[in-house]
Image (spheres, grey):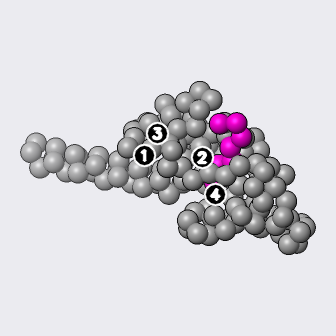
């Protein structure tokens, strides 16, 4: 299954994001209030990085609470690792495993058109496997 099929029906305007100049404290509040693990960071209409729970932990460990007033652009993970909408779920899972990340912006060229998590991909893969198993059972039953 392609990522494009996974994100169809999701409006890219509904993707929660932040900007490079927002303070880290604000981004942490956003993560907590939306109960999400990461947000894409935008500048001039394009994705320039990702800010995640891990960024918070690493910065707090290194700098203490002084990092909370810094702009996200100084502490985010950049450049953002992205996946094209034409990639398959398995390609995206492989990329996440290789790079040890849990969130991927989905792009169409330079434009972000979605944001997926490892949970989205695992669910899609499990649904696919369940569908294949059902098809095999039906085939065996009617053979």
Which disc, if any, is residue 104?
Answer: 2
> What secondary structure is found at the residue carrying circle 3?
helix
Q: Nearer the viewer, residue 128 or 46?
A: 46
Q: Residue at x 85, y 59 (%)?
A: 70
Against 63, residue 90 (above or below) is above
| Distance between the alpha carbons at the discs numbered 2 and 3 | 11 Å
Task: Please state which of the two labelled residues, at mark 3 or mark 4, is closer to the viewer.
Answer: 4
The reply to whether dot 1 and dot 4 touch (C-beta < 8 Å) is no
Q: Point out the tag, 1 or 3, that comes first from the N-terminus.
A: 3
Q: Point out the tag, 1 or 2, that comes first from the N-terminus.
A: 1
The answer to whether residue 10 is magenta is: no
| Distance between the alpha carbons at the discs numbered 1 and 4 | 17 Å
Against 80, residue 101 (above or below) is below
Which disc, if any, is residue 10?
Answer: 1
Q: Point out the tag, 3 or 4, that comes first from the N-terminus.
A: 3
| Distance between the alpha carbons at the discs numbered 2 and 4 | 9 Å
Q: Is residue 59 left or right of residue 96?
A: right
Q: Quadrant of the C terminus?
A: top left
Q: Is residue 9 left or right of residue 29?
A: left
Q: Is residue 2 left or right of residue 106?
A: left
Task: Please state which of the two labelled residues, at mark 2 or mark 4, is closer to the viewer.
Answer: 4
> What secondary structure is found at the residue carrying circle 1?
loop
- What crowding class fits label 2: few (fewer than 14 Cα within 10 Å), some (14-19), or many (20 or more)? many
Task: Please state which of the two labelled residues, at mark 1 or mark 4, is closer to the viewer.
Answer: 1
Q: Which residue extends farthest top?
A: 109
Which residues are drawn in magenta?
39-45
Which disc, if any, is residue 3?
Answer: 3
| Distance between the alpha carbons at the discs numbered 1 and 2 | 15 Å
Magenta residues, dominant SS class: strand
> What secondary structure is found at the residue carrying circle 4?
strand
The total number of labels drawn is: 4
Q: Quadrant of the N terminus?
A: top left
């Amino acid at each position: 299954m392609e990522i494009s099929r996974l994100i169809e029906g999701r409006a890219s305007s509904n993707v929660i994001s932040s900007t490079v100049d927002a303070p880290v404290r604000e981004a942490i509040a956003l993560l907590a209030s939306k109960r999400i693990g990461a947000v894409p960071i935008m500048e001039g209409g394009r994705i320039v990085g990702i800010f995640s729970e891990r960024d918070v932990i690493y910065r707090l460990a290194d700098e203490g609470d002084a990092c909370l007033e810094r702009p996200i652009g100084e502490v985010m993970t950049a450049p953002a690792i992205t996946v094209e909408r034409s990639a398959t779920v398995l390609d995206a899972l492989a990329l996440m495993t290789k790079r040890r990340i849990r969130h991927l912006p989905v792009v169409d060229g330079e434009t972000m058109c979605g944001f997926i998590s490892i949970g989205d991909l695992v669910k899609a893969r499990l649904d696919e496997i369940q569908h294949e198993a059902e098809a095999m059972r039906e085939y065996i039953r009617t053979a």
